[in-house]
Image (cartoon, helix red, strand yellow):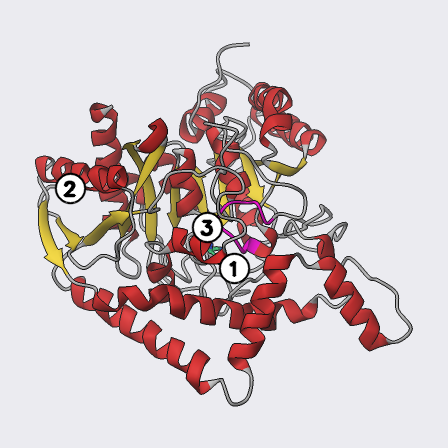
Amino acid sequence: MSSIPTTASEIAAAIAAKEITAREVIDAHLARINARESDIHAFNKVMADEARAHADAIDADIAAGRPVGPLAGVPIALKDNMCTRGVETTCSSKILEGWKPPYDATVVTKLREAGAIVVGKTNLDEFAMGSSTENSAFGPTRNPLDIERVPGGSSGGSAAAVAAGFAPVSLGSDTGGSIRQPAAMCGVVGVKPTYGRVSRYGLVAYASSLDQIGPFATTVADAALITEAIAGHDVHDSTSIPQDVPSFVEAAGQGVKGMRIGRVTDLPEGAEPEVTARLNAAFAALEAAGAEIVDVQLPSLSYALTAYYLIAPAEASSNLARFDGVRFGLRVNAPDTNAMYGATRAAGFGDEVQRRIMLGTYALSAGYYDAYYGKALKVRRLIADDFNRAYEKVDVILTPTSPVVAFKFGEKVDDPMSMYLCDIYTIPTNLAGHPGMSVPFGTGAHGLPVGIQVLAPALGEVPMFRVGGALEAAAGGAQ
Ligand code: GLN
């Protein structure tokens, strides 16, 4: 067997050129999973047989000279909140254990059409609520760089799968930072596209006005490649944007000459000093690469966390009402229907999910609606206005992704507020509906990776990938 390339684009090219087979690629990744998965627990389910069969089918097509997709033979891991037809989709919740969706999410269909091979469903904080993967009903995922530490969350399994080399690329979902924050903590690239850029059809909803699917990868070019493959209008998602998708891969290599990069002078405090030092190094590197650094203000940013923890739980309390023991997964029998609902939901939902449902129900209840939910929506508008004003002066904005590097298990899990603060820099973008990405940029405390976040206006993925590519090039030189 010749050596297996590491990136998705190299793998696709080598398979298309018949230098290696899709089967060799899959077997190599499954061997890595076998060797380390018991320590990492990136997956809820490894789909070894299905993946091998898919690889063999691709190899047969190539041998027969039939056309194959641009991602033919590329292994990909999916967060276990994306529907896969006939394959358990649990959201890492007991309430959905054993449920097999009758359809594929649009992103899954698109990836399969492009020839990508699904290797498994990855672990997450239950229903994507959390920042460490400790809220999974099936046990936490461990950070491949230090297994005493969390991989971040909620897409911790997808981030860890890429960091451990179980797959060159994976998909996560980001409602308040759940792609970017674990990417930062595992030292990989993570992208949250513009709200509506990627179809949410078949993504189990957490907070529908904020949720967005995006990729993890080891390089910015691979992240661009996968974003391109999953983006585009979908009639099955009424919030998906009817806009053509430009080449993000090209953008990733264009450099930043003449671009204006925003530095937020009133950024909420709380970042570790080593993280702030990396942010300053990132500004210096982009300036050296030909960009101009411009100061901007985002005065409403300090209210973002509060607004998010009203809006997201409010939407979650409504979305999760459908899990009642009647239509999906778990049912705990009881003497009457109401008692059955209660018993099922009490047994099926973990503590954090129950906390969010109660917070959200309270925020939406008569008499409190205007004071909490209504006020949060006004704050959301102010945050979007702040960003739009800033983007009159700059093309992108740079911040840290996470204020802290990967922390140890148990450090924050009993203190929801300190866990919620992990997303202080990622949440505002979700509220505005804008794209954002995290790019590894050196290390901070304990030699652990630090991610720099690149934010851009709605549909600004091209400038975002340009800056992401430049940061990656500079990080390579700096380490
Ligand atoms: N950590 C945040 C939360 O718990 C964001 C989660 C996400 O983006 N899915 O809600």
On-image quarter of the N terminus: top right
Residue 160 horizontal/vertical position (percent): 50, 34
Identity of the residue drawn at 34% across and 79% down? 378
Quickly name the residue at label 1. 200
Tell which circle, 3 or 2, labels the residue nearer the N-terminal end.
3
- Could you say which quadrant of the image residue 217 lies in? top left
Q: Which residues are magenta?
A: 128-135
Residue 443 horizontal/vertical position (percent): 30, 30
Separation of marks 3 and 1 at Cα, in angstroms: 15 Å
Would residue 178 be seen by someone viewing this image from the given angle?
Answer: yes
Left or right: where does residue 117 sit relative to residue 100? left
- Please, what secondary structure does the residue beneath circle 3 have? loop
Quickly name the residue at label 3. 178
Q: Nearer the viewer, mark 3 or mark 1?
A: 3
* Picture layout, residue 268 above or below residue 146: below
On-image quarter of the C terminus: top left
Quickly name the residue at label 2. 283
